[in-house]
Image (tube, coloured by chain):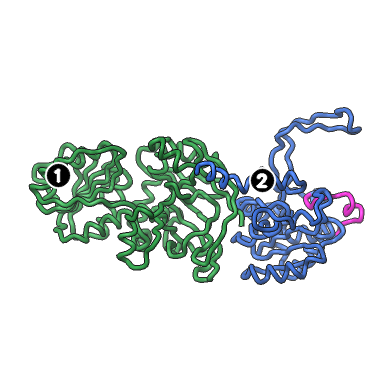
Chain colours: A green, B blue
């Protein structure tokens, strides 16, 4: 079968490609229905990755947050028309749960929309074990399911932290971008006994974080505040400030989870880490297991309502020029999500 | 219920090959198979009727029934011209469709028809009863009665290039074909024209440049080049 792929050829320029698609018995033919633009996609679109990275990875189809429907399963295991969430992280070997967690960080694992085609295509052969079927009628708004990827990333970070024995009376999230927002929602739902504290930078976003038990502004943290578990969801140069605060406010033996991406290096005062016996762990992307854990959250009315609040635009993508417009809008959006409805 | 008719009964005189153009390979498969798969994989399409040269019906039917389960497939012999082929398809479909069902009539030699074009044909036919897939004319249209001098240059913005599918409510196109004349059969080369001759409106659906017709060796060369574009870029990078 012939498919259409819209690839970013150069920063700012999408091009349509027609290709034959081949299907193996391990794969299922899917049609992406909705997608969402994330910061990583925008860094490619605006040419903000190092030049050698851009030269190596482009042309590439962007978008790794998506939902799809099954068009054809050669083994008949998944019904035609079934709604699925495709998992963009593609490990080479993963059979058990432990494998899934270790393979997430294997160097040969491929990630869609980062040098390996993402979901800006009108059909594709996708590994069957990397599809999470879900009941679309349980989700109030079909497009909301594209948040499954972001939710799974937050679930993954939380699960990694909980692998370590630690108190979790006070859990704090630094960052008022979408990763921070969704991580705080996941913690609110999955750790209901914990006190959730959100540390934000922009006071105008305070209303979004109404679900937090306590809301603080970075740089003006209270004297008596401390936390057992801290999630850094800031990224970029601002990570430095967030990490400084996390070192100050983490309780001895506390755990800090790093989820923000920095292109450069960020200084850390190791004396504080040593004095308090802190543990820092990195968390990135997610696995098929985390996506499965994300589905019940999507179907939760309270959670779904919180996701709807952060949708800023929905673009119908009929061709490459529509995709470019959506990316330019997303580039000018300070907080919120630009969704894509694929129709090409 | 929605049905697709894929017209592949032609002899391909303009193609100048030993086999008709719809059976020439494009990439790994014959052109007709790519076109068929576009409709087979589309969730809105329930029935596919392939109109084939008589001598190919049996072999293609055997192959496709084996390889493409799950949808209703019909295999019909083509006629002397396009209208006769369509009439044969409509006759075969009359056992499967009711008057309100939708039928999309598509050239087998347009393998790049997109899911969006198919969806829009179904949606707008349900709404309007008859639609034609078109793209705006990009070149200036020049009219010449004698083939030597320009008679007229009409304003381009009113002109479109017709593609397929052309789609109709089944009851409407069946009635049009029931009343078709010998003159119509000889003079008209597409189904939208037949509907227009009955003074019924035909609405426009946006086509795409990529949905071009593979009629000449040059068209096939272009189609092959499009399919190889990403492979060649990969090789250049390596």
Residue B158 point in image, percent of width and height: 73, 35
Q: CA distance from mark 2 to mark 1?
A: 59 Å
Residue at x 15%, y 37% (from the top left corner): A220
Q: What is the residue that sits farthest to the front in this orientation?
A: B238
Residue at x 19%, y 38% (from the top left corner): A267
Q: Please check the rendered image and state whether residue B183 is part of the magenta-colored stretch, yes or no.
A: yes
> Magenta stretch?
B179-192
- Is residue A164 left or right of A317 when viewed as pictured? left
- Is residue B182 left or right of A137 when viewed as pictured? right
Chain letter for the residue marked with disc 1 in the picture? A
Q: Please check the rendered image and state whether residue B3 is part of the magenta-colored stretch, yes or no.
A: no
Asked which secondary structure carries label 1, the reply is helix
- Is residue A27 left or right of A176 when viewed as pictured? right
Q: Is residue B200 visible?
A: yes
Chain letter for the residue marked with disc 2 in the picture? B
Mark 1, residue position: A247
Asked which secondary structure carries label 2, the reply is loop
On the rendered image, what quadrant is the N terminus of chain B found in? Answer: bottom right
Q: Is residue B203 visible?
A: no
């Amino acid at each position: 079968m012939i498919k259409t792929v819209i690839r970013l050829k150069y920063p700012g320029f999408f091009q349509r490609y027609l290709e034959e698609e081949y299907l193996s018995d391990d794969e299922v033919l899917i049609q992406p229905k909705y997608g969402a633009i994330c910061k990583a996609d925008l860094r490619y679109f605006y040419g903000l990755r190092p030049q050698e990275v851009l030269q190596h990875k482009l042309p590439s189809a962007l978008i790794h947050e998506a939902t799809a429907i099954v068009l054809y399963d050669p083994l008949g295991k998944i019904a035609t028309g079934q709604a699925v969430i495709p998992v963009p992280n593609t490990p080479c070997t993963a059979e058990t749960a432990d494998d899934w967690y270790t393979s997430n960080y294997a160097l040969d694992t491929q990630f869609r929309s980062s040098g390996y085609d993402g979901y800006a295509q009108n059909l594709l052969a996708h590994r069957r074990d990397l599809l999470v079927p879900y009941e679309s009628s349980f989700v109030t708004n079909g497009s909301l399911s594209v948040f499954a990827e972001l939710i799974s990333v937050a679930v993954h970070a939380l699960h990694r932290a909980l692998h370590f024995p630690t108190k979790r009376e006070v859990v704090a999230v630094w960052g008022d971008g979408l990763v921070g927002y969704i991580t705080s929602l996941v913690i609110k739902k999955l750790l209901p006994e914990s006190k959730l504290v959100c540390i934000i930078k922009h006071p105008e976003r305070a209303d979004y974080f109404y679900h937090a038990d306590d809301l603080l502004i970075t740089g003006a943290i209270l004297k008596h505040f401390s936390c057992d578990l801290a999630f850094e969801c800031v990224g970029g140069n601002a990570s430095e400030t967030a990490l400084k605060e996390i070192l100050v406010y983490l309780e001895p033996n506390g755990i800090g989870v790093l989820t923000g991406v920095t292109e450069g290096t960020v200084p850390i005062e190791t004396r504080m880490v040593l004095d308090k016996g802190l543990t820092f762990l990195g968390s990135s992307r997610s696995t098929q297991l985390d996506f499965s854990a994300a589905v019940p959250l999507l179907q939760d009315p309270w959670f779904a309502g919180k996701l709807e609040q952060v949708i800023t635009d929905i673009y119908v993508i009929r061709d490459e020029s529509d995709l470019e417009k959506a990316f330019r809008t997303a580039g000018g959006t300070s907080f919120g999500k630009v969704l894509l409805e694929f129709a090409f | 219920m929605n049905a697709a008719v894929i017209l592949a009964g032609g002899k391909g005189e303009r193609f100048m090959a030993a086999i008709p153009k719809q059976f020439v390979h494009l990439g790994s498969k014959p052109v007709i198979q790519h076109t068929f798969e576009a409709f087979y994989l589309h969730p809105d399409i329930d029935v596919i009727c392939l109109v084939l040269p008589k001598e190919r019906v049996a072999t293609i039917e055997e192959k496709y029934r084996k390889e493409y389960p799950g949808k209703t497939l019909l295999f019909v012999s083509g006629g002397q011209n396009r209208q006769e082929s369509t009439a044969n398809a409509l006759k075969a479909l009359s056992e499967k469709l009711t008057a309100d069902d939708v039928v999309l009539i598509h050239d087998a030699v347009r393998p790049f028809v997109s899911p969006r074009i198919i969806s829009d044909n179904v949606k707008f036919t349900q709404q309007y009863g008859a639609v034609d897939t078109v793209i705006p004319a990009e070149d200036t249209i020049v009219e010449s009665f004698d083939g030597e001098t320009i008679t007229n240059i009409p304003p381009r913005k009113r002109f479109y290039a017709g593609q397929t599918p052309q789609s109709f409510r089944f009851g409407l196109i069946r009635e049009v074909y029931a009343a078709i004349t010998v003159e119509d059969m000889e003079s008209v080369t597409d189904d939208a024209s037949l509907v227009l001759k009955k003074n019924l409106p035909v609405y426009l659906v946006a086509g795409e440049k990529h949905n071009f017709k593979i009629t000449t060796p040059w068209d096939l060369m272009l189609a092959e080049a499009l399919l190889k574009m990403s492979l060649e870029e990969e090789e250049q990078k390596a």
